[in-house]
Amino acid sequence: MNKADVIIVGSGIASLQLARHLRKDLNVIVLTKSELNQSNSTYAQGGIAAALHEDDHPRAHYLDTMEAGRYMNDSSKTLQMTSEAPEIIHDLIQDGCVFDYEENGALSLGKEGAHNYNRIVHGGGDQTGRRIVEGLVSKLSSNISIYENQFVFELAKDAAGVCCGVRSKSADGRHHLYTAPHVVLATGGCGQLYTYTSNAETVTGDGISLAYLAGAELSDMEFIQFHPTLLYKNGKTKGLVSEAVRGEGAELIDENGNRLMQNIHPLKDLAPRHVVAQTIYAHLHKGGHVYLDIRSIPNFIERFPTITSMCEHNDISIKDGLIPVAPGCHFSMGGISIDNLGRTTVSGLYAIGEAACSGVHGANRLASNSLLEGLVYGKRLAYYINHNHFTQIKKPVERIYDYSPSSLPLPAREEIQRRMMENVGIVRSEIDLLQHKEWLESFPIYEIPEFDLSLLTTEQVNILLMLQTAHLITCSALEREESRGGHFRSDYPEEIELWKSKQIVQQRNLERRDTHEQIET
């Protein structure tokens, strides 16, 4: 058993920001599913949104965030985040993070979809995430131990139901128990539940499932953002083409050269992501093709080195100026319900970053608010733990399992991804959702709490947790009978005012053996 003061599961920007700001006398353990730099944060191309220009203001940033979120956002939390954004940028600069600057020495501020001002801070063109991650890692002190290739398969709780640790399996198959009075989930979203995604291979939604199985409340799981522009070739997506490309003047065109967004939205190519993604999807569904026309950007190779390299690797000519694109799963607005400090509804358990539902994104996240959220909540939670550290670690309850399966009838992850893309993807309907729910329930997702997961392979556990998260999304999508933000129902294609004030909450009833979730609106 490994004892610590704080356990952080995940190694993205939220995790590293938290670790960076924790007291140096605290023993901190960071557990990551693969390697330290294998996270969505590292691959983030866009940047961080912050009202830094003299003509801009945090309230304007707040208004854009609320509009993009279709007013499902928690208003006070959203304004607090946008108000803290400028200080977050100044902190990173003081820490030595290298951003891009104009010739006059001012920070270079880009523009992305649904922003009414240039407020996107970026580094290395399209390498912002990597630069911030590298900067935060360089500031980690000796009190922080990082364990790579640790798959956390269960949260440990004491007799009173307080989360007091995690159980994991290392690459060599050995089991480990780590205990601490503070357990933080910073595991990211669930992009790999879908065939087309911009997410790292490890981002399968397992942290969300672990919290749910431990009895934590979840919310807004139906709101999944599909990024409009992933590089698309031979029926497969190959990686993200940042929204910053359209911010620099690139336009979406069809196979005949017609501008796709011309008469769709006042902001045209920089419309909110769900509008652009649905428009591209509809055109592709008709058998057409969609391209990002970059011919108006003279310094594309210098401005977007990562995208250039990705195109070259996939034999897409930058000189021709047309990048074939398709939408794919990018971000989950929903997740583990948290308060303003990152506390979940389970004592001792916290969540930050994309795994959490903080309320700041509403039904659709505004571009470049994801890194911002992780940085804001990571710093905020560190401050809370630094001033509210509990030293006593309770003993985890020894679990008694009803089942100890050595093998299970489980689908391949590719089948889960394909079915999620088809039935719970960009366009949804009651018929498709019900069929998919029935398929998911043909597997033992309700029995997961009774299984001794340590007896299964890492891949088997991962598949079970993927099925659990997929089921949570599907049930929420069935419950919300309207279209709003990242959730589009073809049988309820309009926003309905009544639904704006309703939030779908899911929580496993620990008192019931069948473990069906309770859904509230």
Image (tube, helix red, strand yellow):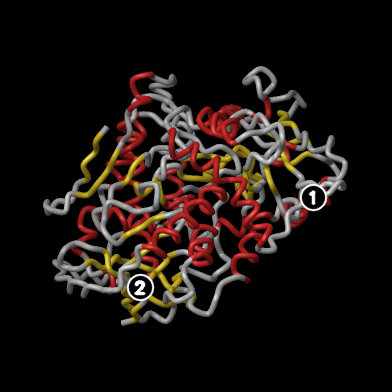
| Left or right of 192, for residue 110 | right
Q: Quadrant of the N terminus?
A: bottom left
Note whether 295 is above or below 463 in the view shown: above
In three-dimensional space, the C-alpha distance between marks 1 and 2, rounded to whole angstroms, equals: 43 Å
For marks 1 and 2, give the one nearer the viewer.
1
Residue under the image location 71 percent in, 38 percent down:
53
Mark 1, secondary structure of its residue:
loop
Q: Position of residue 410 (x, y in %)?
A: 32, 59
Note whether 152 is above or below 27 in the view shown: above
Asked if marks 1 and 2 touch (Cβ < 8 Å), the reply is: no
Q: Position of residue 369 (x, y in %)?
A: 56, 43
Q: Nearer the viewer, residue 231 or 494?
A: 494
Q: Position of residue 470 (x, y in %)?
A: 36, 47
Mark 2, secondary structure of its residue:
strand
Q: Label 2: few (<14), some or many (≥20) within 10 Å?
A: many
| Left or right of 357, for residue 46 | right
Residue under the image location 48 percent in, 38 percent down:
78
| Left or right of 265, for residue 426 | left
Which residue position is annotated with label 1? 101
Q: Position of residue 171 (x, y in %)?
A: 44, 77
Which residue position is annotated with label 2? 168
Q: Is residue 262 visible?
A: yes
Badge 1 amino acid = Tyr
Question: Which one is earlier in the sequence, the residue at label 1 or at label 2?
Answer: 1
Badge 2 amino acid = Ser
Q: Label 1: few (<14), some or many (≥20) within 10 Å?
A: some
Q: Is residue 422 visible?
A: no
Residue under the image location 36 percent in, 48 percent down:
338
Please tell me in which quadrant of the rendered image residue 292 appears: top right
Q: Quadrant of the C terminus?
A: top left
